Image: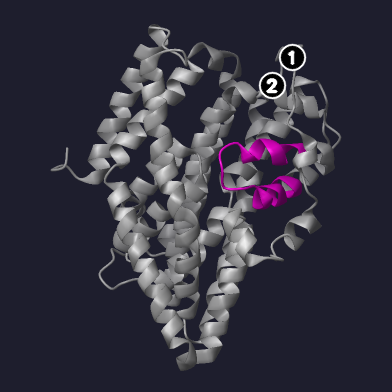
Amino acid sequence: MKKLPMWLQMVISMALAVIVGLIFVAANIDEGNWLYSFFAFISNVFIRLINMLVVPLVVTSLIVGVAGLKDPLKLGSIGWKTIVYFISTTFCAALIGLILVNIFHPGNGFTIPSDIKAPDSNKLTSLSDTFLNMIPTNPIQALTQTSILQIIFFSIFIGIAMVFLGEKAKPAYNFFEACFEIMMKITAWIMALAPYGVFALIVKTIADNGTTVFAPLAKYMFVILLGLFLHLCIVYFSLIKTLGKMNPITFMRGVFPAWLIAFSTASSNATLPVSLRSVENNLGVSNRVSSFVLPLGATVNMDGTALYEGVAALFIAQAYGIHLSIGAQIIILLTASLAAIGAAGIPGAGLITMVLVLNAVNLPVEGIGLILAVDRLLDMFRTSINVLGDCTGSVVVARREGEIEEGTEQIA
């Protein structure tokens, strides 16, 4: 395996995992079996190793990335381009989802189960509170509690201060740069274990969900998967070709490791170390751009989640026989976009923010129970699109800023 390229190792691991997972389902191997417990243990170890890197990598990469810009005008240029990109692509994703769900009507004829449970709505915060909570009252506490938005906010401020201090902050910059290089070295070690971690994760996922549970929701799943595919091809590939000046095939080949980790972990945050490594080493994006765009994108750029929440809201309305006007669907479009921005980059976060979308148009919150059975599988797909969106943004912003190494494949 070591002689094969990493992407091929991962493909082989993924294919074998599907076969083994189906064998688990056929043999009824579940949580009570020692073999299942072994794969669960391996997958948990792999996820913990990746999560171990998130906070120190976010802090060091953001500080080094922002401080490395040196010119305050450059910092502002990258910042506004990144924000415009995030908002625009998130809105496009939600719009694609609503168009498809109105074409296919996946909720028509659905039989609603009797014992529906919804997520705890007390876990939700208002939009204003979400922005207020970005500002840490105690940065140390934010680090220990892994409050990613607060960590990003504080790290960016440190980097900005170092930009304005110039040479006076040079010792601090050298320290954080050394820490960043250490974290990237640890990332390389952990990524050598990726084929085995991916294998265990996918086997466990298939063993948990089986195959028969997806049949009643096949149309709903089809609409979401089609929407994610169209968003990738229409939005991301167009941006890669026109603004990023890069061949989409080159792009996908370069970010494949990040896509596969995102798919298997369903966590944008857990994929961040791999995303940074992929766009810098494989696509030539400078660390100054990637260390700003990717950590921010892992928290606020959730295109796949926005598309999913729009489709799910209309699916629930159709399942209950509730007709939504164009005005109500526009509210869903806007709310899904904003809710996706506030969703955490962890597995299942979209279910919590889904309550916000349903409440915006007075849809029954208990309808979330209709989609719980297939949410974990769809979470893997939408998270992989979230991560591809972050990587696309880093390429686009880097190309517009002239921050991609010469020799990276371009198109006319």
Q: Over which residues does the magenta segment extend?
A: 334-355
The kind of secondary structure element at disc 1 is: loop
Q: Earlier in the sequence, mark 2 or mark 1?
A: 1
What residue is at 73 percent from the left and 31 percent from the top? 119
Disc number for residue 230: none
Q: Nearer the viewer, residue 189 or 297?
A: 189
The quadrant in which the C terminus is found is: bottom left
Q: Which residue was labeled with disc 2?
A: 370
The kind of secondary structure element at disc 2 is: helix
What residue is at 61 percent from the left and 53 percent from the top? 145
- Asked if residue 357 lies left or right of residue 312, the reply is right
Label 2 CA crowd tier, 10 Å (few <14, some 14–19, many 20+): many
Disc 1 marks which amino acid? Ile
Q: Position of residue 411 (x, y in %)?
A: 32, 63
Q: Nearer the viewer, residue 169 or 159?
A: 169
Q: Position of residue 24 (x, y in %)?
A: 38, 13
Give the colour scheme of this rendering.
Answer: one colour
Query: Outermost residue toward the left?
Result: 3
Q: On screen, 9 above or below 91?
A: above
What residue is at 39 percent from the left and 69 percent from the top? 179
Q: Are marks 2 and 1 in contact (CB under 8 Å)?
A: yes
Say whether residue 353 is magenta.
yes
The quadrant in which the N terminus is found is: top left
Disc number for residue 112: 1
